[in-house]
Image (spheres, rainbow, N blue to C red):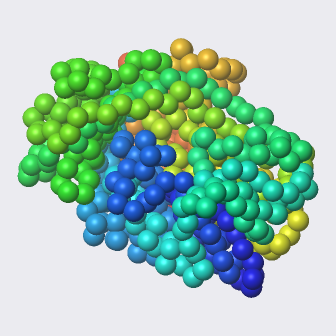
Amino acid sequence: MSEGRHAVVLGAGIAGLLAARVLSDYFSQVTIFERDSVEGAEVRRGVPQARHLHGLLDRGRTIIEQLYPGFTSEMASCGATTAEALIGTRWYVGGLRVVPTSTGLTSVMATRPLLESVLRQRTLAAPGVRLCEGAARGLIGDADRVRAVSVSGEYGAQAHATDLVVDATGRGSRAPVWLTALGAQAPAEDRLEVDLGYASRMFRRTPGQLGGHSSVIISTGANGRGGGAIRVEGDRWHVTLAGMLGDHPPTDPIGFAAFASTIAAPDIHEIVTTSEPLDDAVPHRFRSPVRRRFERLDAVPQGFLVLGDAFCSFNPLYAQGMAVAAQQALALRDCLSDGPDSADLPARFYSAAGKVVDVAWQLAAGADLSHPGVLGPRTARTRLTNAYVARVHRAAHVDPLVARTFMRVANLIEPSTALLRPRVAGRIMLRGSSSTAAVSDFDGQPSVDRTPIPIEPTR
């Protein structure tokens, strides 16, 4: 730990808390500034998406478990759902249910407020970490180095001297404007217009629903419609419906139920139409995923880093945001271990974080571009990849080996190249054609045999 060294984190969301936890191992003082009050707030004003489903991919969960030992069991003790993906959960991809099979993946499903609360308590328990209410107004320094940050709080705007500022203020980050004001470069942006809209509602869960065998249902369809229903704390169903390209779910009860009837998972429609609603449906709109290319800048100021959605925000349908933020926090830890005072820390971090983002962005952007209405460059590679992914979806409906590999890739545990291994690719080509894919009867029983298939060791 660097004695007498001070780090400031802007934003007390998931990315900010993970960053603060990592920084606490290298700085004697870590101050988190958050513009919203966290006392007694079920949903913070700055996080309207907190009312909707949040999925934590297993790659994110395992990293958080490293940073906060016992995290998974603590979440379960607070009422979160934990289950093995595809065993205690039901996944519908491309309109078909993925065959139930062992994946070695643990799903942790809870409301965003619970997840944030647990991480906040654990982070603030780390030595030297404190949380203060205040909104960041800008950086103080020059194009070579950031030396302080201006924060407005109870006593007006004040400058807080710091050795490192980490911007984790989310997709609305003002980092490009702040950097320009210092005379530094602002990053270029990649953007896709998906115009996603979703609506969420809570329902009372009754014992034995869905046969008592599943507490998580996730569905994404080829038409851009999707949804999810998860059992959350308080023995409730948290249901979110979503649609892309302006095809947004209604919030009135009749319209909400009608939209639920059109997605691939009949389980979700059953929950909506047979369970007692506990609140009204609330909407949210997400127009575009945005990637800021900090890793391509020729020069970056010392003493300033950008992390989380401020670096890259993803289409929420794919639940990548928290897992990628966790990977970036791990990259930050690795970079700090080489020297928190080194002049090239920002460049090294952006290089490492950019590689992390590459994987998730390619998966998400490819999926977005499979919808004809999404504007964006479609190279020959993109078209071939999406054609292959469509085969993967169909094969995963009937083949346990493909299903397992696909889920591990989607959870960022294995690289996408795992789907190209000869043994897996052969099954995808054999069982992924539209003429051989089985038609789902939606009762969890695929119309093929379930003979166990040996799985290759993870490389």
Residue 259 lies left or right of residue 93; in this view the side is left
Residue 451 versus residue 121: which sits nearer the camera? 121
Residue 89 seen in the figure = yes
Total residue callouts: 0
- Res 268 quadrant in image: top left
* Res 102 seen here: no
Q: Residue at x 50, y 23 (%)?
A: 195
In the rendered image, which quarter is residue 250 located in? top left
Residue drawn 69% across the image and 20% down it = 377
Residue 6 is situated, as x and y percent measured from the top left of the image, at 72, 74
| 248 sits to left or right of 251 | right
Q: Is residue 50 left or right of residue 299?
A: left
* Residue at 64% from the left image edge and 57% from the top image edge: 156
- Image quarter of the N terminus: bottom right
Which residue is located at x 38 percent, y 21 percent? 248
The correct choice, above or below, for 305 with respect to 393 in the image is below
